[in-house]
Amino acid sequence: MSSDTSPIILAFSGGLDTSFCVPWLKQTYGREVITACVDTGGLDAAAASNLRERALALGAIEHLLLDCKQVFFERVIRYLIAGNVYRGHAYPLCVGAERGVQAAALAQLAIERQATTVAHGCTAAGNDQVRFEVALRTLNPGLEVLAPVRDNNWVRDEQLAYLQERELPLPPQGSAYSVNRGLWGITIGGRETLTSENSIPEDAWVLSAGAYSQPLPPSKHSLSFKAGIPVALDQQPLQAVELIEKLEQLAGAYGIGRGIHLGDTVLGTKGRVAFEAPAAVTLITAHRELEKLVLSAHQSRIKDSVAATYGDMIHEGRQLDLAARDIEALLASSQQRVTGDVHFTLQPGSLFINGVTSPHSLLAATRGVYGEAAGEWSASDALGYSRVLSLPGMLQTRAAGKD
């Protein structure tokens, strides 16, 4: 047994894996355990209270709830919006993007409690083990990181038996689906997502169950942005976190942002997961339309190219890499004129952009009317431009000996 007597900081979600870790770490290492839940969205007061009670009943010396929703927005989500980031052209990184923020909070907590060790309950099969450990070791290379379930190959029945033998509280059981929820959306895993053939059943959806069988009537809304940041919903000024939470409920009831993502895991295998990200999809769709009005073609192309790399880095847990800071600087610069209002209609399964306005509109800045009248150029200018633009093709045709 180690001579280290500092407490072990355990990332605690209240599920079976982290519930098992509390008494196992205490018994194995002879050290106290401090559990920490880093709230990056999707956790109400009742759930937070239940987590605290369960952690203390399992033997934690202290349980902490760390509110990092605003930090999550400022450090990650604002750039996912700025980059219009989707993975596989469909999935808005609704769960997993917060792991770097959570790791940073745990690393800071370890410093405050003079702890040398942080533990998590990830298994060997998923992405989160990599995300947590890359982030933790980047923040504090000397920090010891423990993953008891992964490193000892504990299976579900063994963990349940361990808790039952010690008459310790068991986490809620019985659901056929694994649900992870955060500020940017929800992921849902079940037997259907283990293969590529079928969708999950209608009643397994969390935010949008019944959106098609009991459809709501169409409704019109607006989103306002200031320098790329969402600042108002239906002309009501809101802080970003509250706006996202309200938009999730509004658009989720229409089935917006529902999908199943099939793609590459951090480990290089294929993975599949159902997701609901109504706020993320609505915000990205509206933001992209506003950008079309105010950004030049070159700005959009350059931004799109680095945004894809940024999405990969977030997915892989490398958001603390200095290259991510460089990309964020470019994204932030690109948003200086992304200010305006986007008007849209919600219908079941449909998000339709009605129109967009901005004080920085490039459409309004021209004196011409597309397809109708020239403005800054004359008919002879247009003729000369067409001739110059056709020159490479003309030369290629001559070089082929066809003229």
Image (cartoon, grey):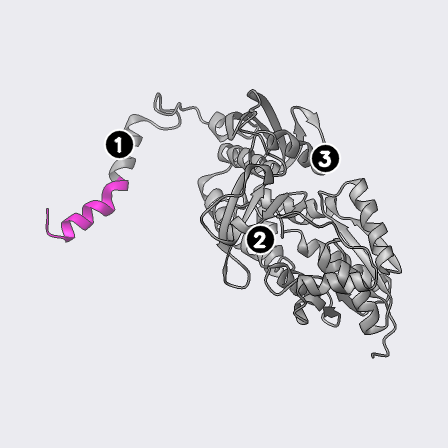
Q: Residue at x 23, y 44 (%)?
A: 391
**Picture quarter containing residue 9?**
bottom right
Q: Provide the secondary structure element on which disc 1 rests.
A: helix
The residue singled out by tag 2 in the image is: 327
Sooner in the amino-acid sequence: mark 2 or mark 1: 2
CA neighbours of label 2 inside 10 A, class few (<14), some (14 to 19), many (20+): some
Instruction: Relative to 82, say whether 292 is above or below.
Output: above
**Is residue 75 in view?**
yes
Foreground of the two, 157 or 336: 157
Question: Is there a contact, CB below 8 Å, between mark 3 and mark 2?
Answer: no
Callout 3 amino acid: Glu
Marker disc for residue 242: 3
Where is residue 90 drawn, in percent x and y? 50, 44
Q: Residue at x 39, y 27 (%)?
A: 376
* Magenta stretch bounds: 388-403
Spatial separation of the CA atoms under disc 3 and disc 2: 26 Å
CA neighbours of label 3 inside 10 A, class few (<14), some (14 to 19), many (20+): some
Say how many tags the image has: 3
Callout 2 amino acid: Ile
CA neighbours of label 1 inside 10 A, class few (<14), some (14 to 19), many (20+): few
Instruction: Relative to 178, say whether 291 is above or below.
Output: above
Marker disc for residue 383: 1
Marker disc for residue 398: none
Q: Residue at x 36, y 28 (%)?
A: 377
Q: Provide the secondary structure element on which disc 2 rests.
A: helix
Q: Provide the secondary structure element on which disc 3 rests.
A: helix
Spatial separation of the CA atoms under disc 1 and disc 3: 53 Å
Callout 1 amino acid: Leu
Sooner in the amino-acid sequence: mark 1 or mark 3: 3
**Is residue 336 in view?**
no
Foreground of the two, 249 or 369: 249
